[in-house]
Image (spheres, coloured by chain):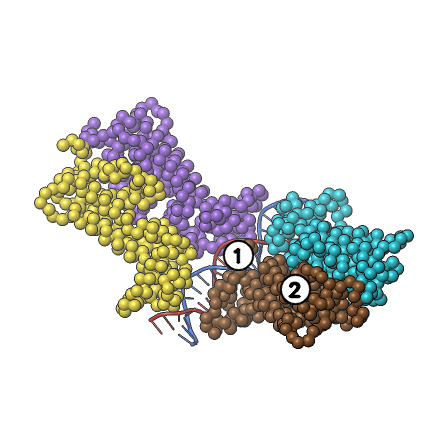
Chain colours: A yellow, B purple, C cyan, D brown, E red, F blue
DNA sequence: CATGAATGAGCCTTCATTCAT
DNA sequence: CATGAATGAAGGCTCATTCAT
């Protein structure tokens, strides 16, 4: 666990190799989802991928490396989605967007994250556990937080906000947001029609200055 | 995984047996913490517990049953702590407590939860995954939510709050609270001196009526 | 298998002990029938018998000893039945019985044997295997053969028979008889309404002198 | 026991694999003969075969599957021998064969069956028990019976026989024959010099019409 | 490079048997 | 004598990984 190589063994240069690697990853994802981590053995992966075990070990030094690759793939895809969703909020533009809209956008971005390969995501997060991939998750959270912090520093936002440490606030928001979205019982909560609105409220209120309610205008 | 017996196999009647069971549970906890779930084999548990494998299987039908027992123990202890902490807030008392204090109490209660065997708690939640223990976690969350909802309905609280569905709000709070406390990167966040205060703020603001800031009184 | 004690450990003198032994034997029989030899463990036997394992080992030196005891019980009961059934044929009586009737009686005796605890009998014979109890089975076959030989030597019988070695003929008959009764597919054959009659015929013809058919009289 | 896979797991494609499978089967046969079914563990088999347990499980899903394979092998070989031996009796030929010769041939065929791996045969039949392989044994018996019935229907045979149901008679003969050959104490009986002749007699008499003895010619 | 046969440590579990209470 | 907790050898089986072809 400590001294094990977890990175891919060699970058596949030929096209055929690329196909092989892809097949292995897909097979692993399927098996993970269908039968869980424990039953996802290298032999089974190879078989499902239509490849020999030997080939598998040509590209991955060990079983966990495959899972890690999958994890990274997923993380990158999710980050991409998140960053794309958030992009608008950061673009310089002529007219102002009210804070509440910005927050709504942020929340939408986090929510969008859940749509990326949800099954795989779930199994990876819950069964494999992110403990083993702390770095990745850290990076993930870090980048999200930075993005949010940047958004919070946007002049348009600042105007409506009370004075606070953008970094810290971003952490709170991201953390709370993910908690709500990925915690136990999240399914039920998210399904509630009031959910999105209330989550916006939660965060907006937190950011706004005291004594200046939303509807006060 | 689905039809496996997970309950304890037979209750230890003699005192000696009780000691054995206890040793097994402790050994398992230690191994889980030190080496993770995957390396915690029944043989190792038995060895560490200074007991034979046979004894282990006399009280637990299989490895997971031990982990489940541990999980239940922990969950019960945590619930106990939480409920004890929250108890005051629910007691009828002569003078009013301001909402912010109530929230602070709530948060304190959730935080207190983290002090119960934190290492074991982490490994159990993260590596073993609560997916397999949905019922327990559900119960846990349910009870916490109910408690919070009850607190929110307290006349003293109502006075300072905007009109909202106590149950829903409780869900949001509990969920967000746990997210902040148990999510990735929680350690760092919690360590921040501003943390507790800000979390209070987050929730208080959410509950208070618009246009009525905290310091406005 | 070779140096293992197989006899009962000590004769139970007290009444209570006798009851215990009986309970153990019954429990074993039930378990053998219901779950087969492999799943019939001493612990299970003890439990089913409502006795502690320790007590079990008070009366039997090891597991197989119980099975052996059961086997012996059964063998003795079957022999008893066989001998009782055959008894008449051997009694000196005033009037002659025709050979065919004698044979019919013999066959009836062998058939009667099947009615003694058929389930236990089957499991003991098929799963446990009589290889391990050769002596008993030998004795069994021996006695049956002797009995039949004695019957064949009866003057009444001799009259209708061709000259042959009674011992050898008895062996053939007993052996063939048991083959028909306990071999594979016996069930189907025995169920056939013609069966008993034809079996009589088979043997009678064998015993009668050439050229003197049954119906010639 | 009921839902266990008993068929071979995967067919050996390479020559090396074929050798392995063969070694496993042989080792199992040896162990079965020398130490009995209960002591024939997969580990021992692998060891004796000079192969790793893993290899064993690559070709057989579990221990019993090996035994079953052995059983099938044996059954097929025996059937082959039986059918070959009986073949002549069925061939259309110019001159008649007397019934007694036909029966003699039949008995010879059944006896020949005993020469095929007698030790393995014995252990498989007696200790493992044919109960678990009912289908195979059934097929075995079925085919033998059919063959005999066919022989009985041969015009040459019919001429010397009384009228009877060929199928039923075949069942009786086969069953009795196997009983005599495979029952307890068969060894001794078969060793007797009179045995074969008498067995012929037993069956011939049974088939011939009443009142027409053998020597009547 | 691909293949798939082979490996063997190690896991989970059972069970006959002993022995302190 | 009875009890039942404890033992630990042994069995069945899996699976990550290697290596000859």
Kindly tell me whether residue D118 is visible in this rendering.
no
* Disc number for residue D4: 1
- Quadrant for residue D106, please give it: bottom right
Q: Indicate the quadrant containing the C terminus of chain D: top left, top right, bottom left or bottom right.
A: bottom right
SS at mark 1 in the image? loop
Q: Is residue C140 left or right of residue D89?
A: right
Kindly tell me whether residue A93 is visible in this rendering.
yes
Q: Residues within 10 Å of mark 2 (few under 14, many from 20)?
A: many
Q: Indicate the quadrant containing the N terminus of chain D: top left, top right, bottom left or bottom right.
A: bottom right
CA–CA distance in space, label 2 to label 1: 36 Å
- Quadrant for residue E4, please give it: bottom left
The residue at which mark 2 appears reads as: D149
Q: In percent of the image, x 84 and y 54: which residue is there?
A: C89
Q: Is residue D190 left or right of residue A143?
A: right
Q: Is residue A192 left or right of residue C25?
A: left
Q: In percent of the image, x 36 and y 51: which residue is there?
A: A123
* Disc number for residue D123: none
């Amino acid at each position: 666990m400590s001294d094990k190589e977890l990175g891919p063994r060699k970058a596949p240069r030929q096209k055929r190799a690329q196909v092989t690697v892809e097949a292995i990853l897909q097979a692993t994802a399927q098996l993970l989802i269908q039968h869980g981590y424990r039953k996802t053995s290298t032999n089974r992966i190879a078989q499902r991928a239509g490849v020999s075990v030997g080939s598998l070990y040509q590209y991955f030094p060990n079983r966990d490396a495959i899972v890690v690759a999958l994890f990274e793939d997923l993380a990158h895809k999710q980050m991409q989605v998140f960053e794309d969703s958030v992009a608008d909020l950061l673009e310089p533009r002529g007219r102002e967007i009210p804070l509440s809209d910005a927050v709504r956008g942020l929340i939408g971005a986090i929510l969008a994250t859940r749509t990326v390969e949800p099954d795989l995501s779930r199994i990876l997060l819950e069964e494999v556990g992110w403990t083993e991939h702390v770095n990745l998750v850290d990076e993930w959270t870090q980048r999200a937080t930075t993005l949010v912090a940047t958004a919070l520093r946007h002049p348009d936002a600042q105007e409506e906000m009370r004075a606070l440490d953008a970094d810290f606030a971003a952490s709170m928001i991201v953390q709370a947001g993910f908690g709500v979205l990925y915690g136990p019982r999240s399914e039920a909560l998210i399904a509630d029609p009031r959910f999105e609105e209330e989550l916006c409220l939660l965060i907006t209120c937190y950011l706004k200055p005291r004594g200046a309610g939303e509807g006060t205008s």
